[in-house]
Amino acid sequence: MQYEEQRRTLERFVAERGDRLLRTAALLAGSRADGEDLLQSALERLLRHWRQIDRDPENYVRRTLYNLATDGWRRQRVQQRKAVLFEPAPPADPATAVDLRDAVVRVLVRLPPRQRAVLVLRYFEQLSEAETAEALGCSVGTVKSATARGLARLREMTASADSAEAAAAKERS
């Protein structure tokens, strides 16, 4: 009997406040379709924790909507950064593509083996942190730290190469 009462309470909550929550979700997500997905995820979490929520569930759903939207924004920002780092515009000249690939390989070879493996699996093979950890037989924390160190080292190496090229160009002129 208690289960049926909880189910009716949840259905009533969604019927009464669903439109307002959908508007909020659509504003957070940027479109109605993405807002519907966001609200559905939040309601799934509400359903999982329904028995543990003592107060008004609307606050729980709103906080969940915001947290899910924030996670999405972070993911997008990280993907945009990765796209800038590892997906240059396609070169017009095939020789340029070969030169670019050669430069990437030369820089990667200078990294320690674990950092090189993590970067290749994460960014070229598009594996998640968990999948990379499983493939390498290490923890997710190790993947994260190797990624951070490897990217920092790549930045150092490419910055020094850029400054060396600028100095050589300056000497030629």
Image (spheres, rainbow, N blue to C red):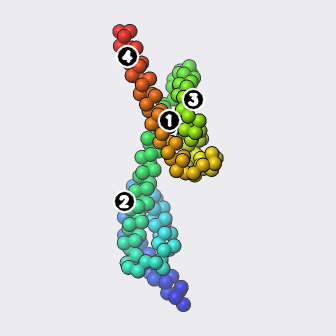
> Residue flagged by tag 1: what amino acid is it?
Phe
Residue under numbered circle 4:
167
Query: 80 or 144, which lies in front?
Result: 144
Which marked residue is nearer to the observer: mark 4 or mark 1? 4
Q: Which numbered disc flags the more N-terminal residue, 2 or 4?
A: 2
Which residue corresponds to the image point at 45% horizontal and 58% vertical from the top-left?
A: 34
Q: Is residue 155 left or right of residue 107?
A: left
**Position of the N terminus by quadrant:** bottom right
Where residue 80 appears, x then y in whole percent? 44, 42
| Gap between marks 4 and 1 measured at Cα | 25 Å
Q: Quadrant of residue 115?
A: top right
Q: Which numbered disc flags the more N-terminal residue, 1 or 2?
A: 2
> Residue flagged by tag 3: what amino acid is it?
Val
| Gap between marks 1 and 2 measured at Cα | 31 Å
Q: Which numbered disc flags the more N-terminal residue, 3 or 4?
A: 3
| Gap between marks 2 and 4 measured at Cα | 50 Å
Secondary structure, mark 4, is helix
Estimate how packed mark 3 is, as few (under 14), some (14 to 19) or many (20 or more) residues with alpha carbons within 10 Å. few
Residue under numbered circle 1:
86
Residue 97 visible within the image: no
Q: Which numbered disc flags the more N-terminal residue, 4 or 1?
A: 1
Specify the label residue 27 is tagged with. 2
Estimate how packed mark 4 is, as few (under 14), some (14 to 19) or many (20 or more) residues with alpha carbons within 10 Å. few
Q: Is residue 123 left or right of residue 164?
A: right
| Gap between marks 3 and 4 measured at Cα | 24 Å
Residue under numbered circle 3:
109
Counting every numbered tag in the picture gives 4
> Residue flagged by tag 2: what amino acid is it?
Leu
Secondary structure, mark 2, is helix
Estimate how packed mark 1 is, as few (under 14), some (14 to 19) or many (20 or more) residues with alpha carbons within 10 Å. few
